[in-house]
Structure formats: structure tokens, C-alpha cells
Image (cartoon, rainbow, N blue to C red):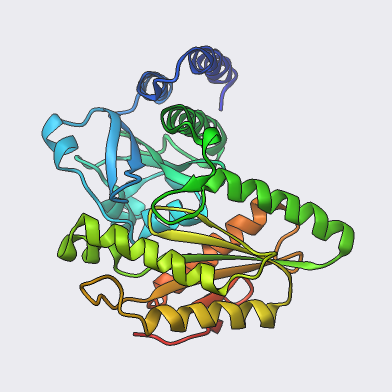
Amino acid sequence: MTHTKSDECLNFVSEILNLLKSTNQHEKVLSLIVDRVVRMYHCQTCAIILVDPVTEYLQVAISHGLSATFENAFRRKLTTDVIGKLLWTGHPVVIGQSERQPELAAGLQLEVPFGSCLCVQISADHRTLGYLQAETKESGIFSEDDIRPLQAFADFAGVAVHKARLYEENLRLDTVDHDTGLDKYSAFLEKLGISLSRAQETRENVALILMDVDNFKHIALTYGHDSSKKLLMEFASIVRSRLRVIDAAGRYGYDEIAILREKTSNDDALEFAEKIRKDIEGASLTGNKIQTSVSIGLALFPEHARTEKDLLLNAKEALYEAQRAGRNRIVTASQYSSGSYGAEI
């Protein structure tokens, strides 16, 4: 980044921060971010694409250079493609010259072909919210050097969205997620932090287990919203039945549950996760007798991570690998796809 562009970036950062401090309306902040990215890089297209927390589909929140028709029609699933990997792992995607990576460019392209492109994850509180994508008509515009400034803009977007959701939902007044009966994520995260601090003093292990209901969107479309909500409650009930007094469980995503298991070992945590996997696999859920399964990612402190952030990231990556490898299985942070534990359906 040139000295002139660096000064311009700092000015834009100051503008965004001032707006972020003064409003809970994230749309205003996102609009300013897109405008400033376009001005910095002379983008033909720039878009902030967010995960709908209810449907878990990707949708365009704010954009420059996209037609209204394209924006309205844009609705993509979370998959294990290049964008899926970006969302799960947070690793940026840089294409300096699209002609040198035509297949990758085609997979990322929004409405029209581009010469250069950069995509960075938008997240907050260790949870993925979406991504920022910037495209230029000319080749050779984006490089590894542009990741940091674009990631800074994406981080501001994540804070804005998270701040707005906290304001709207008033999370601090109620720690219970009433769709599952488990802790809300903020309350669970507080327990996780306390647990890790205690584990550092006692030198005991803590397991973080992330579970995702397989084919949940298909179930919701087939049986309806009410049945899918009931399924989540019954799923959570099965999880609660396996918890010890010292364990904790919280709602991590729309159909994802996080479990904190203290004073454990890798074998114990795997055995515990396998029991829940088998419980779900063998259950007939709701009055419709729905059968499904769960994908599970497991990370152990301090074996796989020494910080809360890394523990969450490693558990997320393990869950991603469990889904990518065929679902209905357990993958630990040290195994990934090569050492899955459980059955494939």
C-alpha cells in the first residue's frame, strides 16, 4: 500500500469509527464501508454479504455495482466451496489476476467478470457473520498487502452488525435461549472464559464441542418452521440429558449447539460426543418422526489451543471438516478429515 493510500485509509477508518460510535443502525455503517472501499480501490463491484441468522443463507446486505435484480435474486447456501472455507476458517481469498485462476474466479464472481478480487471474512465474537468482497475491472490491483486494510473494514462491519443485534435482542437481560432452553451464546462464552481461566490454574483439560444438525434446511422446508423449532428443542433436550453438573451447553448458531466439558480427556470427550451422535442418529424427533444426524467438531484445551479464540476456531474448523467429509461424524482438531470418528450416512 502506498503512503498516499495509507493516509486515505486512516482517514476512512476515522470516519467509520465515528459513525460506529454514534449509531446502532448497522446499515449506515456498512454503506459507508462499501463506499470507502470503492473509493480506495476504484472497484467495479463491492458487496457486504451476510448470513441470515434464521435461514443461514447468504444474502447481499449492501453493495456497489450490483443490479437490484441480482441483489434480490442472490441467495446462496453455506457450502464447502471456496466461500464456505472462507466463512468457516477466516482465511482470505486473493485473486490478483483472474486469467491465471479462471476456475476460482468463476466460483467467486458476483454479477460480472472481474480482473482482480479480494474476499475477507466478517465476524464478531468468534462467530462468522458473512464476508466482504471487492472486485476491480483491472488485473493486478489486489495482492496479499491489501488483506490487512480490507480485513480492518470487514472487522468494522462485524462490530456494527453485532452491535445492532445486541441492541435489538437485548441479550444481556436474558441468558436463556427459549428455542432450546440452553444458554444464549453470550452467557455460554462467559462460562467458557471462566472455565479456561480455571483450567490454566489447575492444569486440567477442557473440551469444546460444536454440533450442527445435518440437513436442517431441508427438514425446515419439508416439515415447516414449527416442526423445525420443535426439533431444535428436542435436540437440545437430548444434549442436556448427557450433561454433567459441571458441563454447560449453549446455542452457537441457528441449528448449532456448543458444549463445554471440564475435567475431561480427549478419549472422554470423544466418547461423550459419540453418545450424543448415536442418540440423535437413533431418535425419531417431533410428531413427524423425523430422523436426522449431527456433525461434530471437537477441540481440547490446552492440547489443541491455548486461548479461547483459538479453541473456538479449531473447533469450528473440525466441524467444517466433519461436514465436508460427509456429515454424521466427529472430527477432532488434531484429526480433521483423516481421523473422523463415527458413522457416515
Q: Where is residue 6 in the image (x, y as percent from the top left)?
A: 57, 20
* Numbered-mark total: 0
Q: Can residue 87 be seen in this view?
A: yes
Residue at image x 46%, y 79%?
277
Q: Quadrant of the N terminus?
A: top right
> Which residue occupies the foreground of this view, 132 or 276?
276
Give x and y (percent) for residue 122: 46, 40
Residue 127 appears anywhere in the view? no
Residue sitting at x 25%, y 75%: 290
Q: Position of residue 275 (x, y in %)?
A: 52, 82
Q: In this view, does 293 lie to the left or right of 307?
A: left
- Report x, y in % for residue 286: 27, 70
For the point 27% across and 37% down, the residue is 60
Q: Which of 309 and 5 is in front in this view?
A: 309
Instruction: Name the residue at 24% across, 43% down.
Output: 110
Q: Would you say 80 lies left or right of 245 here?
A: left
Above or below: residue 309 compared with residue 49? below
- Considering only vertical position in the picture, is 157 above or below 21? below
Where 256 sits versus 139, above or below? below
- On the rendered image, what quadrant is the C terminus found in? bottom left
Residue 26 appears in which quarter of the rendering?
top left
Q: Residue furthest left?
A: 69
Front residue (pair 60, 266): 266
Viewed as shown, does residue 21 lie left or right of 325? Answer: right
Q: Front-most of 237 and 123?
A: 237
Residue furthest bottom as drawn? 343
